[in-house]
Image (tube, coloured by chain):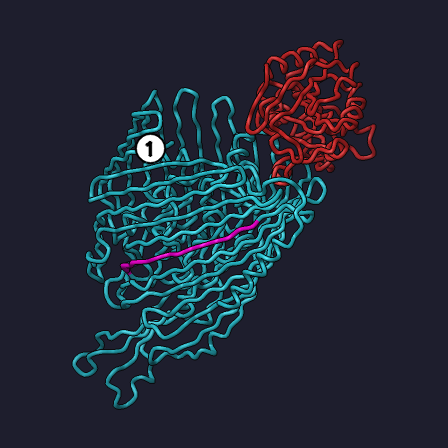
């Protein structure tokens, strides 16, 4: 989908029972995504809470590619897993070979992980093959954590099932995967750290986070 | 005391009886969370852990790095650089601190906590900063909450809360040795040592400091230099943290501090004081949530107190037991339920013979609802039932009996706040709160009697009684606030503006002595004059604060703030001048630079004029104008070795009150940090 630099207002008044405006946010920059122009349009509508919910998720979904800094934050977050040995977490990176952005993100993550990646009390240990194609989900066997790259929407449901069967924590920068209940943890580090947990996905994968941590993050 | 101990056992038993469930250490690992989120985490704002940027109150957090580079030797010195904070520096080692106006001698509207445990001196209704059992080198962060937070903390959080968070003995290894010396006979030595093991840790700290006092010239009494010059502060503390099983953790903290100091209540005083404190906190993750039970005991021995009202101070014992459950309901709702019991005793002073006691039972609840990830609403309520009692004798002529002190107060407080983040870099907070300030045991029951000149030569002297008043009501504070905060990422800059309005009711003070007519009965040679605490009026406070904080990757760090405040009050001026107690304008600028092994820091502070009543005779007060002033401070530090630093600090003199004047100061420290 082509990305524009300006938020685009789309009127859906004829399609919905109540007139309201969706501020469709197509900017890479989450800050610009809620510009004054967008606020002005939203403010005049009656369904402000609904608009805010949508606005929030559009805003946090604007960036979908996991950066090395996101990876650091994700690794630190895993320190708050309970009931798992976080000092040795075997990981995989899921990607779609036919989606260039996904492959590029997977390569970037692979490079960032290197031989292993440690932060806080957590060590991520790559298991060969580190990069797993979405066509090879049985290859997740023996992994503790799977990073889900962007552009995998058609495969997210299958990934969720495979992860649930193997109790694998799925992590992504694509918040849509979390909001749909297919990924456990969404991570963004810019412009500020945001962590989003899907409780249903966490339950399906037997993932438990420390209570204090859950109080500090957003849950769905 | 038996009742207090009984409650303590109940609290501890209740916590330990709960079945552990989840496998996780319960205490908040501040360092780990700060690294994760890139900002400090606090529990002071709501009782639940929250990121500073998401706290539904206006708060500042002074980090350990900021403390280290501040050159400050006392916590009030650090706080006076925070927007909205006023300080009266009566002594080289401390003073009175107020949040957003109405500062006074023995300022009672601010609650001080160390790791959540109360260090407020109920008997004097103030914080005696010199008696804090903590060293600057063991502080992780100082959390400053502006505005009432009685719904979470109770009576004394009427205008603000300061929570000093020390490093965790379990998660943070801190070993610091510091040796200092400088002008005015200043000398100090302190040590902080910690040892951690797999499931716990221990930290010990202690120190000694002395400094010659600055100019101290109350009009009404001589300077008792033999008692408080030099001013000496000693303290020692222990902090033990231990995890039991998978889900229960205990923290035992104990400390002792003693100090000699000068200060100002309604009248100037000199004091030697001692605090012995201990607390036990047990935290457990259970199916019912994060349960926390704690028992805290403070023993203040302030008997060595001398003022124009006489010699003798109180012994004040405070026992506080708390039980709290914190849990999440679904994805969007966080609930905290709290139960608190408080037992407080005080011997009367300066005239002994009476013993006052109070018991307070409080129930509180907090509900935080997240409408969206970026829009949340906080509601907190608390109800207190306070029971006062007294036994013992009265000074001759007192109109009271012990039955007059058999009195109950039931009242409530609340906090509501809406926090909205329209973008990830902006936040808007709207809040309203009702705070309560119960009269201190001194205000209820102080008693003193002395002989004063009257009408020579026929009735040359009179007996002057000054007394507390058991019928005093609590002061109430209604607070409204709007704040906006914005991060400017490319410049690593954060800016905040906060505007507030506050209505304070039932302000208290001591009026001049008045003749008790019945004491002039025929044949009486000694008439009686009396002064009793009374409610005098109300105050309205309006203000705003601007804060900007920034840094860069090239070694620069800076911050600036400006506070504007107006106070109007219908209370007449006796020993307090409420309307004139706060500067209308106040500003701070801090600039720091690091290059190689060198650190340079500079501070500039401006404080507008205030009016402070000063005692000019046995029963005479005048509102003395304290002119505006500018203070500068510089710090230069050099790392001799990576873990060995030498620093020099120079600060200009100033006077923020009419009694004590801080002289130009300079000192050098050698700090080993490993």
In this rendering, the answer to whether B672 lies above or below B624 is above
In this rendering, the answer to whether A108 lies above or below B623 is above
Count of numbered circles on the image = 1
Q: Is residue B199 left or right of residue B167?
A: right
In this rendering, the answer to whether B631 lies above or below A4 is below
A9, B165: nearer the viewer = B165
B465, B326: nearer the viewer = B326
Residue at point 23%, 37% (across, down): B666
Residue at point 39%, 56% (across, down): B276
Q: Main secondary structure of the magenta part?
A: strand
Question: Where in the figure is residue B326, as x and y percent of width and height?
Answer: 63, 48
In the image, residue B277 lies in the stretch drawn in magenta: yes
Question: Where in the figure is residue B616, as x and y percent of width and height?
Answer: 24, 62
**Which chain is disc 1 placed on?**
B
- The range drawn in magenta is B268-282
Q: Which residue is mark 1?
A: B672
Q: Colour of chain B?
A: cyan
């Amino acid at each position: 989908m082509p990305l524009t630099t300006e938020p685009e207002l789309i009127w859906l008044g004829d399609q919905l029972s109540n007139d309201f405006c969706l501020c469709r946010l197509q900017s890479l920059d989450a800050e610009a995504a809620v510009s004054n122009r967008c606020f002005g349009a939203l403010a005049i509508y009656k369904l402000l809470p609904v608009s805010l919910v949508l606005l929030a998720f559009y805003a946090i979904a604007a960036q979908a590619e996991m950066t090395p800094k996101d990876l650091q934050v994700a690794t630190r977050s895993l320190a708050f897993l309970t009931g798992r040995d976080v000092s040795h977490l075997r990981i995989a990176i899921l990607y779609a070979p036919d989606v260039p952005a996904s492959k590029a993100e997977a390569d970037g993550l692979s490079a960032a992980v290197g031989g292993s990646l440690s932060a806080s009390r957590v060590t991520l240990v790559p298991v060969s093959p580190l990069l797993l194609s979405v066509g090879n989900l049985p290859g997740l066997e023996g992994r503790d954590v799977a990073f889900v790259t962007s552009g995998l929407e058609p495969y997210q449901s299958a990934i969720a099932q495979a992860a649930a069967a193997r109790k694998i924590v799925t992590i992504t920068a694509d918040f849509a995967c979390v909001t749909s209940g297919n990924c456990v943890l969404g991570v963004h580090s810019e412009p500020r750290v945001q962590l989003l947990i899907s409780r249903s996905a966490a339950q399906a994968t037997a993932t438990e986070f420390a209570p204090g941590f859950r109080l500090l993050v957003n849950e769905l | 005391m038996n009742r207090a101990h009984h409650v303590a056992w109940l609290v501890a038993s209740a916590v330990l009886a709960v079945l552990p469930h989840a496998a996780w250490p319960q205490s908040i690992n501040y360092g780990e969370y700060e690294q994760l989120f890139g900002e400090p985490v606090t529990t002071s704002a709501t009782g639940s852990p929250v990121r500073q940027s998401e706290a539904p109150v206006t708060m500042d957090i002074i980090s350990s790095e900021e403390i280290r580079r501040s050159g400050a030797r006392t916590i009030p010195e650090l706080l006076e650089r925070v927007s909205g904070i006023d300080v009266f520096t009566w002594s080289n080692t401390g003073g009175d601190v107020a949040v957003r106006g109405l500062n006074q001698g023995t300022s009672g509207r601010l609650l001080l906590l160390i790791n959540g445990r109360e260090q407020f001196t109920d008997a004097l209704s103030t914080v005696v900063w010199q008696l804090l059992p903590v060293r600057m080198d063991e502080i992780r962060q100082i959390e400053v909450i502006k505005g009432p937070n009685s719904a979470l903390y109770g009576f004394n959080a009427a205008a603000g809360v300061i929570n000093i968070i020390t490093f965790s003995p379990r998660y943070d290894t801190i070993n610091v040795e510091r040796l200092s010396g400088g002008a005015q006979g200043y000398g100090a030595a302190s040590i902080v040592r910690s040892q951690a093991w797999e499931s716990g840790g221990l930290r010990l700290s202690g120190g000694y400091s002395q400094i010659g006092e600055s100019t101290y010239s109350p009009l009404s009494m001589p300077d008792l230099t033999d008692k408080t010059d030099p001013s000496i502060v000693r303290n020692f503390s222990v902090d033990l943290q231990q995890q039991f099983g998978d889900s229960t953790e205990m923290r035992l903290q104990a400390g002792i501090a003693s100090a000699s100091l000068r200060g100002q209540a309604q009248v100037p005083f000199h004091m030697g004081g001692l605090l012995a404190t201990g607390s036990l906190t047990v935290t457990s993750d259970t199916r019912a949530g994060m349960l926390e039970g704690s028992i805290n005991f403070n023993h203040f021995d302030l008997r060595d107190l001398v003022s124009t009202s006489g010699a003798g101070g109180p012994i004040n014992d405070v026992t506080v037991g708390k039980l709290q459950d914190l849990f999440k309901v679904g994805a969007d709702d966080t609930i905290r339920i709290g139960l608190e019991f408080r037992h407080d005793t005080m011997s009367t002073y300066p005239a002994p013979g009476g013993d006052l006691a109070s018991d307070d039972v409080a129930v509180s609840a907090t509900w935080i609802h997240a409408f969206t990830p970026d829009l949340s609403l906080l509601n907190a309520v608390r109800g207190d039932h306070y029971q006062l009692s007294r036994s013992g004798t009265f000074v001759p002529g007192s109109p009271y009996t012990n039955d007059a002190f058999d009195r109950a107060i039931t009242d409530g407080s609340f906090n509501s706040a809406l926090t909205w983040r329209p973008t990830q870099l902006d936040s808007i907070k709207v809040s309203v709160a009702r705070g309560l300030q119960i009269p201190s045991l001194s205000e209820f029951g102080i008693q003193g009697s002395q002989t004063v000149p009257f009408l020579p030569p026929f009735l040359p002297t009179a007996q002057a009684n000054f007394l507390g008043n058991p019928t005093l009501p609590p002061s109430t504070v209604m607070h409204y606030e709007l704040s906006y905060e914005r991060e400017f990422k490319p410049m690593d800059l954060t800016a905040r503006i906060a505007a507030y309005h506050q209505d304070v009711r039932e302000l208290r003070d001591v009026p001049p002595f008045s003749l008790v007519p019945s004491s002039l009965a025929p044949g009486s040679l000694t008439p009686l004059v009396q002064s009793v605490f009374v409610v005098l009026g109300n105050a309205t406070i309006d203000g705003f604060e601007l804060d900007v904080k920034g840094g860069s990757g090239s070694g620069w760090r800076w911050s600036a703030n400006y506070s504007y405040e107006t106070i109007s009050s219908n209370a007449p001026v006796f020993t307090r001048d409420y309307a004139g107690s706060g500067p209308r304008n106040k500003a701070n600028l801090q600039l720091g630079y690091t290059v190689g092994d060198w650190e340079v820091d500079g501070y500039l502070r401006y404080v507008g004029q205030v009016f402070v009543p000063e005692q000019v005779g046995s029963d005479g007060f005048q509102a003395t104008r304290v002119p505006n002033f500018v203070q500068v401070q510089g710090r230069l530090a050099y790392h001799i070795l990576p873990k060995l630093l030498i620093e020099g600090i120079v600060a200009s003199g100033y006077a923020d009150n009419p009694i004590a004047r801080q002289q130009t100061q300079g000192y050098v420290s050698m700090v080993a940090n490993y």
